Amino acid sequence: MNEDKSPEQLRAEIARLQAHNRELEAHSRELQARVSHRDEQEKRQRQAWMQEMFARGGEMGGLIAKRDWSSTSVGPVENWSQSMCMTLSLCLTSRFPMLLLWGPEYIQFYNDAYIPILGTKHPAALGQGVATSWPETWERGGPYLSIRENNELTFYQNARYNLYRHGYLEETYFTGTYSPLRDEVGRLSGLLSSTMETTQQVLLERRLHTLGELATRTASLHGTADVCEVVLKVIAEHPEDIPFALLYWLSDDGKLTHLKGCIGLDEQMAFSVPEQLVLSDIEASSGMETLAQVVHTHQVKTMDGLSPLLGDAPLLLHEQTVRSACVLPIEQGSGDRLAALLVAGISPYRAFDDLYLDFLQLVATQIGTALANARSHQEARARAEHLAALDRAKTSFFNNISHEFRTPLTLLLGPLEDLLSGSQDALPSSVHEQLSLVHRNALRLLKLVNTLLDFSRIEAGRIQASYTPTDLAALTRDLASMFRSAIEQAGLHYQVHCPSLPEPVYVDTEMWEKIVLNLLS
């Protein structure tokens, strides 16, 4: 078809095509300008949004904004993905401790509430990978490995982590979650942790349990040896707070200590522990002077260096060496003298702060209370045994003296009854009356002696009543009438009012007679 067109037509066609191309180029430039303008607007909006996010992020927002991230695996801020920025915004503005781990190295971002958890690792931890910042947890896997394997949310409650954040490997506990984060195409790109430190709560509950066990298991003990044995058993069951313990008993003058027991030591260390210490002979440079100081001042002392007590072999709690102990006075009763000394090992995983000291002092107080209770029980038992011995001696005395009185009374009554039972004419009436009086008084004395003997039998638990159906009113009237003549001779009006009962009463007549006669006499 081009062969049919003239050169002028071809030139015109070419001109039209060139004009169309120029229009397309102009339109393309316009589109590029619009896109560039839009990108610039989005960039400015993103920068403004990022600046606002950092401004609202408190201290950590400011630190993140100032840092040059181009040298890290997450790259410069302007290249951060939308999902990362949104998650970081959530982290920075939360009042709950939150940690964002991003990228294959798990680069750390965290908010202000998370700073206390880091301890001395802040602010260096910002921008560091977990393996660099927390080698003590990374080497053990932790939740990072679990999420990599399962790719799902991980929840942990009062989980223990030994963290190096205050200059030593510290026992800590946390409750929280680790949530997997995915980028725009669904790949695992990071982790978001919401966590709360529960160390103090766990320690408090554990220590209260120890104190409760001490109180419960020593409450019913009645011997000091039993108290010492049970106390050491309870402490041995809670090595996290007291890795080892020695219990020294003090002599009454406070100059001598005797080892009552030890726990938490192997055979070699237990063999190295001194069985007995003469406190006055301890030299100031021996390493044992702390014990003498506690006895002298009644004040708690710490003991740095355990070789004088335990020998040179290291004492381990898990993987750390126990290097110090607390020596506590144990007061018994009023506190004017010491009963014992407790040497309690200090956990290398905890700082020896006021809370730790308060716990150990409560342990010592609980031991002192248990010893005081046991001593009080022993004293009460000794008093009871002494009173029982006195009671037995009293009963024996009453029994013996009753028999001693009955013998001469029996010898006296025999001849009297023989004389009185003879002929009335054998004796003058005046003499007969006098002998009758003597006889009655002797019988009365015999009744008193028998009553005393019955009392001793009652005290000894050997007397038994013999109950028979009795007309109690008639018996009482007869007994009371025996005193009529003596009372009326004294010029008194004597009236016995004892109405009859509808039916017999079961009583021991001899005991009833003694009761009535003792009341009236």
Image: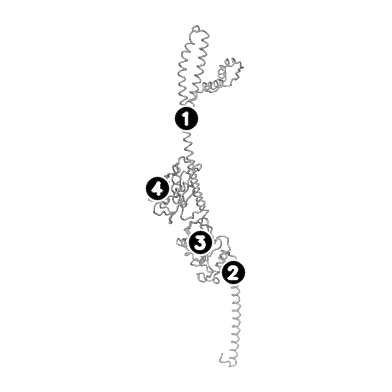
Sequence-earlier tag: 1 or 3: 3
Disc number for residue 51: 2
Given residues 8 and 368, the one toward you in this image is 368
Quarter of image, res 495: top right
Q: Are marks 4 and 3 in contact (CB under 8 Å)?
A: no
Query: How many residues crowd around disc 2 within 10 Å: few (fewer than 14), some, or many (20 or more)?
Result: some
According to the picture, the residue beneath numbered tag 4 turns out to be 274
Amino acid type at image mark 2: Gln
Sequence-earlier tag: 4 or 2: 2
- Residue 83 seen in the current view: no
Disc number for residue 120: 3
Query: How many residues crowd around disc 3 within 10 Å: few (fewer than 14), some, or many (20 or more)?
Result: some
Amino acid type at image mark 1: Leu
**Which one is closest to the eye, mark 1 or mark 2?**
1
Given residues 319 and 91, the one toward you in this image is 319
Query: How many residues crowd around disc 1 within 10 Å: few (fewer than 14), some, or many (20 or more)?
Result: few
Q: Is residue 495 left or right of residue 454?
A: right
Which quarter of the rendering shows the C terminus? Answer: top right
Disc number for residue 390: 1
Amino acid type at image mark 3: Thr
